[in-house]
Amino acid sequence: MLKIYVTSVPVDDQDKALNFYTKILGFIKKNEVPLGEYKWLTVVSPDEQSGVELLLEPMAFEPAKLYQQSLKEAGIPWTSFAVDDVEREFERLKVLGVEFSIPPKEAGTVKIAVLDDTCGNYIQLMQQL
C-alpha cells in the first residue's frame, strides 16, 4: 500500500516561508536539515504530527520558477489545505495581514478561499460542505 509521506510547495525564501507557514498558518516545524545552501525543511499539521509533511522547497531550479510564476499569474493555487471552517479561518488570517485573491465562496460541495503565501504561491483553503 502506498501512502503520501511528503509533498512540497516551492518557496522563494525558506526562512520567510517557515515563519509564514508556522506563525501565520499554524503548522509546526518537523524537520530542518542543512543541505549546503538550502535545507530539508518540513512542516506538519499540529493535529497530524505523524502525518504528511509539507516540504518548503527552495526555488533553485529555473524551469520550476517559471512554472510557479505562471500558476500564480493565472490565479491557480499551488495546492489546497483542508479546514473545518473557511469563514473562520479567513477572518483569523485577514487579521494577521494575509491577503486573499478569492474570499470565501461556495464551489459545488465545498467552500473555498485562496490566499497568497508571500513566498510565490496561491494556496487554496477548502471546507467540505
Image (cartoon, rainbow, N blue to C red):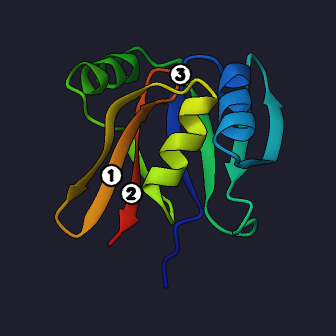
Residue 110 seen in render: yes
Q: Are marks 1 and 2 in contact (CB under 8 Å)?
A: yes
Residue 61 spot, x, y in % from top left: 46, 19
**In the rendering, at what x and y percent does residue 83 appear?**
50, 60
User: Label for residue 126?
Assistant: 2
Taking the spot 70% from the left edge, 48% from the top edge, the residue there is 27
Q: In this picture, is 47 found above or below 21?
A: below
Name the residue type under label 1: Ile
Quadrant of residue 66 within the rendered picture = top left
Q: Is residue 114 above or below residue 73?
A: below
On the image, numbered disc 3 is attached to which residue? 119
Q: Earlier in the sequence, mark 1 or mark 2?
A: 1
Decide if residue 60 is on the left or right side of residue 40.
Answer: left
Q: Give the residue at x 51% y 66%.
A: 84
| Whole-percent x, y for residue 22 in the image | 73, 39
**Residue beneath label 1, please?**
112
Residue 81 in view, yes or no: no
Q: Earlier in the sequence, mark 1 or mark 3?
A: 1
Label 3 vs 2, first from the N-terminus: 3
Q: Is residue 95 left or right of residue 78?
A: right
Q: What mark, if any, has residue 15 been given in the picture?
A: none
Amino acid type at circle 2 is: Met
Residue found at x 44% / y 54%:
86
Q: Secondary structure at mark 2?
A: strand
Kindly indicate whether the residue at mark 2 contacts the one at mark 3 (C-beta within 8 angstroms): no
Which numbered mark, 1 or 3, is in the foreground of this view? Answer: 1
